Amino acid sequence: MDKIQDPDLPEQGLVVDEVIQHLNNPVAALKPIVKKYLGSVKSVLQERNKFYFADGNAKVEVIIISDDIIRVRLAPHGVFLDEFSYAVTGISQKVSVFALSENDDEYRISTNTVNCHISKKDFLISFSDNESHVTCADAKPMHWEENVAFGGYYVFETKQCHPKESFFGLGDKATELNLKGKRLQNWNTDAYSFAKDQDPLYRSIPFYISLNEGIAHGIFFDNTFKSHFDFGAEDPSKTSFWADGGELQYYYIHGPHMMDVVKRYHTLTGTHPMPPLWALGYHQCRWSYYPESKVRAIAKGFRDNQIPCDALYLDIDYMDGYRCFTWNRKYFPDPKKMIRELSDQGFKTVVIIDPGIRVDDNYGVFKEGKEKKYFCRRSDDYFMEGHVWPGRCQFPDFTNPEVREWWGGLFDELVQLGVAGVWNDMNEPAVFGAGTFPDDVRHQYDGHRGSHRKAHNVYGMQMVRATYEGLRKLMKNKRPFTITRAGYSGLQRYACVWTGDNVASWEHLKLGNIQCQRLSISGVPFCGTDIGGFSGEPDGELFTRWIQLGVFSPFMRAHSAGDTREREPWSFGEPYTTINRKFIELRYRLMPYFYSAFWEHNRYGFPILRPLVMHEQEVEINHYRQDEFTFGDKILVCPVMAPGIKSRKVYLPKGDWYHYWTHEKIKGGNELVVDTPLDSMPIFVKAGSVIPESPVMQFVGEKQIEELLFQVYYAPYEANSFFFEDYGETFAYEQDIYLEKKFVTTGDENSMTITQSVEGLYTPRYENYEMKVIGLPFKPSKVLVDNKQIIETNIDELERYRFKANKNFRMIQIFK
Ligand code: GLC
């Protein structure tokens, strides 16, 4: 619902629905609604790392979480809510060194790197670094408005916004990457065929990164109610965020680099677990592949066409009348046999599941849920009922841990049948007609009860959490694969996401690119779009360009609505089939590199996709460059996002780069024009990189790797690369059963050196590496591997200098 007035205009800010409730409520009507602001600071109290400042009535708590993270929260009438968050996993262990000081004007709490200032007179809060740069400052004191209809408060924060400040983050917003000048909100919404700038969409990630004068900081507004962000839209000098309930509670996350902010955000909300390796393969989906013969034909199509694929999806038609956890036996008479035979051909089966449970007393899941009182209820105790695919449905309250446990157990049969992954859909939650649940629906909220206003944005995340945790138990030590449409910050601990029902258009290809980059730096690294567009019809060119981008989406899945034409990689004939094959093969070649980027995320909190601004945040124009990105930090991708394009402009950050296809060496720090024939999307590799590649396979694990290939890109300076490997399907990595390898390359005019160091306990089966060195500025006469000369070397047609080295080598030297 829109604001009637700017939220920052004092004494105003009624929302339309509240006005109506206000008018309908005679008691409320007696009370005028006014916005209240903190007064001056009257007292301060310290309890270890917590500081309490009060104006005589309202209280503000400031907690030092680490050197670089400080949390601020407001209690309008002096009483804080219980400490509870679905997003943040434990904040107490990271306390560091800090001190409180005071002068006539302010209190100051300082850590080793950050200062939090609280001005005495007007209670304005600001943050600065050790070099006295003020990075984030209140434009107004924290403020609030009583919510007469539901109790609690609308809570508001207004900060200064600088003329050159840029903003990034907030999840999957379908708009420009830089959010400067935008007003957006978070309220999980089923947004079928969403348009550019449509807001809100499926997920709520109330976390943004600000970049001003080369310094980044982040704000995580951990509030699950409908929340709003205004990045200088209403007033260019102000950034505001506010919510329709809950606490005004935010984390200030210091940079100075954007990468630091993202990594620190992950220390609060967790990272994505290592996915099973097969989940990085190509996935083929459709609403719907049925009956069984169709699914088998698709599988055959992949193998006949020799196009790699690891996963086939069953959309809602596999169920009996769309009842979750059942099978339509007419279409799928023997699911176990089908899944086993697909598995023999190297395909994993992923099935959809929705939260709506059909009201039907002859249906076991409904009966049990009803008996055990697991379904959501309205304020007067009626069941929450609404129509979704199965017809009239009730909905489990996934915010109840007992319900999550039950739901998780329901996957037992699917797991026994051999299902390898579960796709969680419609969990905004979506309800036909109404959109979603009414506000008064009650939720258990893990013992911190609340209405749907509070639980709406976390409902989907708790559904996929229940799914993930259930599968994790049922699959014993195997990594589950889960995908979700809705979610809230922290969802990355449980699932990967796709951007929902997009459209087969060039505009959506562009949007999808931005959405994935944005998700990645908003803490949701494992993400992808429906390749080809869900609704509408792509032509061969659009589909192929989307496959090319999809190779570099952490999650690579083609999906389409049921009323569209066939949409497999071979559906468009030649030349598209051949090009699609080439690019899907590229996905499989680069799999060890992609997998290493997942590890860097899992272990260190790095985002997987990184927009250009993350590489050179001090270059102002990069704040607005939004269509190129790197996967990990070595491979730069320049997707082609318009029809008939023969060339495009590319910007390469400073340093040396190699054109992936031609090996041409290019100096970065400049824009250049590169050719973009349909069969060659521009990709560049940073000089100094050591990129692992595996042989092309039709599915992960098809072949035993005999020799791992490393492409080494010469640089005349020192550079680091790193490589991760493990079993790819168990949680043994949590017990250090993995290998993390670091390569350091150095080069000059006469020589190149590559060193390798290894950590971890995993032993791969292969013995040797095949090294291919690209871009040497001299003709090599001698190669030493750990001081022993290699005899057999050669140069291939792409002028790569090739030789073999033992996988445990410590140092390779190449001499002119
Ligand atoms: C929703 C999903 C879509 C799915 C369809 C049928 O629209 O977003 O991916 O195919 O429901 O289950």
Image (cartoon, rainbow, N blue to C red):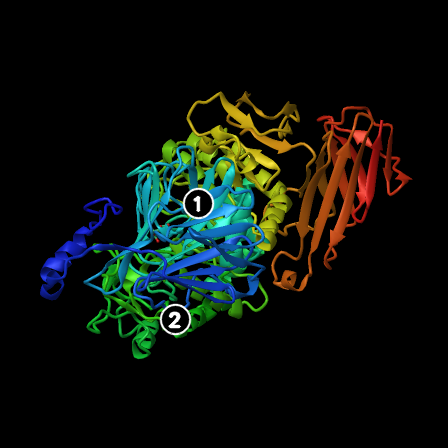
Q: Where on the picture, by quarter, is residue 42?
A: bottom left
User: Is 92 or 744 nearer to us in this picture?
Assistant: 92
Which mark is first along the chain, 1 or 2? 1
Picture coordinates of residue 477 (x, y %)? 59, 67
Q: Is residue 688 visible?
A: yes
Q: Which residue is mark 1?
A: 136
Q: Is residue 257 left or right of residue 39?
A: right
Q: Residue at x 61, y 28 (%)?
A: 654
**Label 1: how many Cα within 10 Å (few below 14, some 14–19, many 20+):** many
Q: Is residue 60 left or right of residue 452?
A: right
**Quick one: which residue is furthest to the right in this view?**
788
**Label 2: how many Cα within 10 Å (few below 14, some 14–19, many 20+):** some
User: Is 252 or 394 nearer to us in this picture?
Assistant: 252
Picture coordinates of residue 435 (x, y %)? 24, 54
- Residue type of the residue flagged with mark 1: Cys
Q: Residue at x 76, y 35 (%)?
A: 746
**Disc 1 element:** strand
Q: Is residue 322 visible?
A: no
Q: Which residue is mark 2?
A: 446
Mark-to-mark CA distance, 2 and 1: 34 Å
Q: Is residue 722 left or right of residue 475?
A: right
In this view, the mark in front (2 or 1) = 1
- Residue type of the residue flagged with mark 2: Asp
User: Is 122 or 618 nearer to us in this picture?
Assistant: 122
Picture coordinates of residue 249 (x, y %)? 39, 58
